[in-house]
Amino acid sequence: MTEVTLNLTRKDFVSDQMVRWCPGCGDYAILAQMQRVLPELGIPKEDIVFISGIGCSSRFPYYMDTYGIHSIHGRAPTLASGLKLTNPNLQVWVITGDGDGLSIGGNHLIHTLRRNIDLKIILFNNRIYGLTKGQYSPTSLPGTKTKSSPMGSIDPAFNPTAVAVGVGATFIARTAATDVKHMAEMFRRAAHHKGTSFVEVYQNCLIFNDGAWDYATNPKTKHENIIYLEDHKPLIFGKNKDKGIRLNGIHPEVVSLDEVDESELMVHYEDMPDGSLSYFLSQMRHERGMPEPMGVFRCVDEPVYEEEVLQQIDLAIEQKGKGDLQQLFYQADTWVVEDESSGQNGSNGQGGNGSVPTLGVDEEYVGVVFNDEASSEPYFSPTDTLSTLNPRQPLIASQDISLGEAIQKLHNLDVGLLALVDDNGKLAGVFTEGDVLRKVAGNVTDLDATPVKDFMTTNVTALKEDDTLAQAIHLMSIHKFRHILLVDDDNRPVGVLSSRRVAHYIQDNFAEN
Amino acid sequence: MSELKPIYKDVDSVVIRFAGDSGDGMQLTGTQFSSTSAVLGNDISTFPDYPSEIRAPAGTLAGVSGFQVNFASKHVLTPGDAPQVLVAMNPAALKSALPDLVPGGTIIVNTDSFTKNNLAKAGYDSNPLEDGSLEGYKVHKVPLTTMNREALKDIEDLTSKEKDRSQNFFALGLTFWIYDRRLDTSLKWIEQKFAKKPAVAEANKKALFAGYHFGENTEAFQVRYRIRRAHLEPGTYRRITGNEATALGLVTAAQKMGKPLFYGTYPITPASDILHYLSTYKNFDVRTFQAEDEIAGIGSTIGASFGGALAVTGTSGPGLALKTEAANLALMLELPIVIIDVQRGGPSTGMPTKTEQSDLLQAMYGRNGESPIPVIAAQSSADCFDTAIEACRIAVRAMTPVIMLSDGYLGNGAEPWKIPDADKIPPIEVKHPTEPNGENGKFLPYKRDPETMARPWAIPGTPGLEHRIGGLGKQPETGNVSYDPDDNQQMINERAEKVARLANWLPEQEVFGDETGDLLVVSWGSTFGATRSAVQSARAEGKKVSHVHIRYINPFPRNLGDILNNFKRILVPEMNMGQLVVLLRAKYGTHEFIQQNKVTGRPFTIKEVYEKINSLLAES
Ligand code: SF4
């Protein structure tokens, strides 16, 4: 976060919505302090988001002129987590209450704290359900008489800061809505902490639970009942700063500074790596006769979740390169299904545009054709190259000759296939006996005036000399080719194999048996 | 040893079931067999069937894990009705799979496991290998454990227990011999998988070879079967499961939007594999979030969508129930998210590893208030890819949550997938406004697009568009909290209209077969394979029956009503007690819908649907 002057004021954070809390509700002070602190942070307001659950406190986002979501009961931390993982640049605040955050949303709260996502969680604790009109909450003390507990509640109370310590929260603080300066400072500290910040705010619900925090907020009594935490300082409290906390065995106890020297007192360290000191502090409760700590219990640097998520992404990109979908699709064993309709003895002569596809290895036939039930041990291998079959020289002519000339050549030399080449000697197409019978006979009147080009097959399936016998047999048996043309790497015709030649080769090699 | 000369027989298709104890590695064996068959160019369809307890008591019927593969030289749409070959690693496997085997089928058993103790655990009073109860089947008795130990005796770094673990590769090798499969795909897999454990790799390889050579050198296995390449559309293929296809579809959609993919979820059978796959795609800026529960899974997804990611959550039936409230929040916030439900046997925890289509009504109606959410369903494992992309397209177009229904059968089953050209998949256009859309520089978060009725997707970080949205009733356009009766009525109308209008944009329903006739079979989701095959068979015999397979369930295709009008009777096979029929009756009530329902945890067989078609045609 760069500290730029944005000239934001409190007013910039006030939305156009009417605030609808009960007059005198503690929530007003919290809202006001938040609107006061945010302009100081140097964060553009479009980068700030408030997310809440359900309850009186959760109306909060509507009153802030930032981005915001008023979500569903208890789930605000989940939305905030997804948002922060999507855009870590945002400052995301979670507004929750004792019912929302500790009862229905308890699971989300503890797991969010555990992960240490950089969220600012403010828990308004009024020890009651306000919005549903006054049932006891998880932080109500046992014996609380409410509509749902006319004889007093039985449930032991949740201790929010102890919960936070227990799950390893990296920033834990407590303040009271009546103590506006202190509260503003806690918000500031929470904002600056990198990781999940958890701030419990004592908030008075004057309608259903008025005076629940009186001991901690009444100016007359509070100094005896609370203790302000200061980093690296001994725990001292009391209106006259005359009392302190000393560790007796494993129990903190209140001592009078008239009797005990300051050096014997517990000293507060916010950054103690383990949580034991924070836990001691969380156990100091009013109902146990102890002053309740106010301030920062704990503030430690730990790896921040979303940063680690992004680091893993960067690392993955570094290791594998930026994702390429086509590559990803091919991350498995693949196989190719050839287009079986492109045979050179096909019945139509128009073919393609002169490209000459070469067949890929059809491996299955390598293993299949030669292990036939009638066959004995072969003395040749299906992987023999075609050159070992001594292919004949092909009959080659220019593709520009006439149909008459082509037929003449086939006839004179008594061969079945004529390879036609372009000016560079590269294969352009083939013309076969079959073509004469099927396409020419009866269709053409003047053979010498018609170019052979019009009747040759252009998309020829040719093989190379180092292709295997298996492939030749595949073409002959599956596609019914009678001749197979062999080409070199430059696509010039270099040989021709007839089905007869192949049959003889196989026969010759079996004959020795 | 005298020279053996194998005899070859050509067959069109074979259905084989590998069955053993859940610790026997049968899922792996089946997967390896289907991968190799796929690479050889056969069409395949697979059906894994395993117990929900990872280690149910060994040797018991409850602990039997099976994997069925249908591999063929023709196009297959299902894993096959009944296996012709059963590989049974123990008595319990034999006992549980035998009723499915075709009469006269082949059984390969590991005789070493037929001990008194194991027979008793499987509930056999006498040894079926000796008491004649397997008469009529071709039984191959193989002392597999003994032979495998013998083959691995030179490997020093493993205990005999560890060596026994490679037994499944011995069985695999033997089937590779019988069906003339190459070993290289599996050898390569072993090398990669156990690169860090060379002793295990060696044991598995040796076991594989040993099984293969055992077949080669055994008189009884001298009939080998060949299944030629299937005639599939030309192209490059791979084998894919529905869950992997879903994961690939999601990452493709995100790339096509130019967005990070956020996947917030909680592990649940049978959907977890989607998370597993996606968590390996981090170099595509995929951010997976294994949340603390189902609700956090969808909550984080909504937050991610607010932030501008393509946001998806995945689950199965019980998880969908938990996500209900948050799904409605997404509906009210009008943020795009995709919810994937890989359905399983219900209700409650039900049968987690078995398949069902019984979440349809939950997807449609299982939320409080008026809650129209688009629902689409995948028809096959490979189709999960297209369906996932489609779900994302709909979500961002209409700014709405979308539910995609898959199921355990599709999610875990596999089939060949023709790999698409990634560049040819069209981009998915997404707009994020940067300027206010109201008067005096005000931003109105619920001011709708006149055509799609979607609200603008303004994301945090955009100056001047700060706005608050929530789950409370709203004023139109401003989105401010409002309990005004007219406002509420209008917003509910608008949300319904927005989803209904999708039908104008989505493709029309196609009919397989004649456009009119006496009988139409209507199906959705994973019953596609069995239904289409059954209709094909009936039509091949000249019967007048057509098939409509519905992908878009909410909203229904705009021409569906017209199609139904052209048929006298409509048969609806479903792996539930008639949930699509409820929807069809509600919308097209005047037709005669005949239900065919099944909730046994197993998919329909072709035969079941075929026989139903025949009996209906015979009546009329
Ligand atoms: S009910 Fe209590 S907490 Fe709620 S607004 Fe009123 S005073 Fe505040």
Image (cartoon, coloured by chain):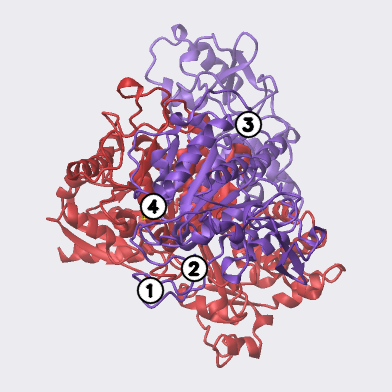
Q: CA distance from mark 1 to mark 3?
A: 48 Å
Which residue type does callout 2 highlight?
A: Pro
Q: Earlier in the sequence, mark 4 or mark 1?
A: 4
Tell me which residue sits at (43%, 50%) in the image: A26
Q: Residues within 10 Å of mark 1 (few under 14, many from 20)?
A: few
Disc 4 residue type (three-letter) = Cys
Chain rendered purple: A
In the rendered image, the quadrant that contains the C terminus of chain A is: bottom right
Quote the CA–CA distance across marks 4 and 1.
21 Å
Tell me the number on the disc at residue A149: 1
Pointer 3 chain: A
Q: Which residue is mark 3?
A: A1
Picture quarter with ligand 1? bottom left
Name the residue type under label 1.
Ser
Proximity of marks 4 and 1: CB atoms separated by less than 8 Å: no
What crowding class fits label 3: few (fewer than 14 Cα within 10 Å), some (14-19), or many (20 or more)? few
Which residue, given by chain and number where applicable, does mark 2 sit on? B83
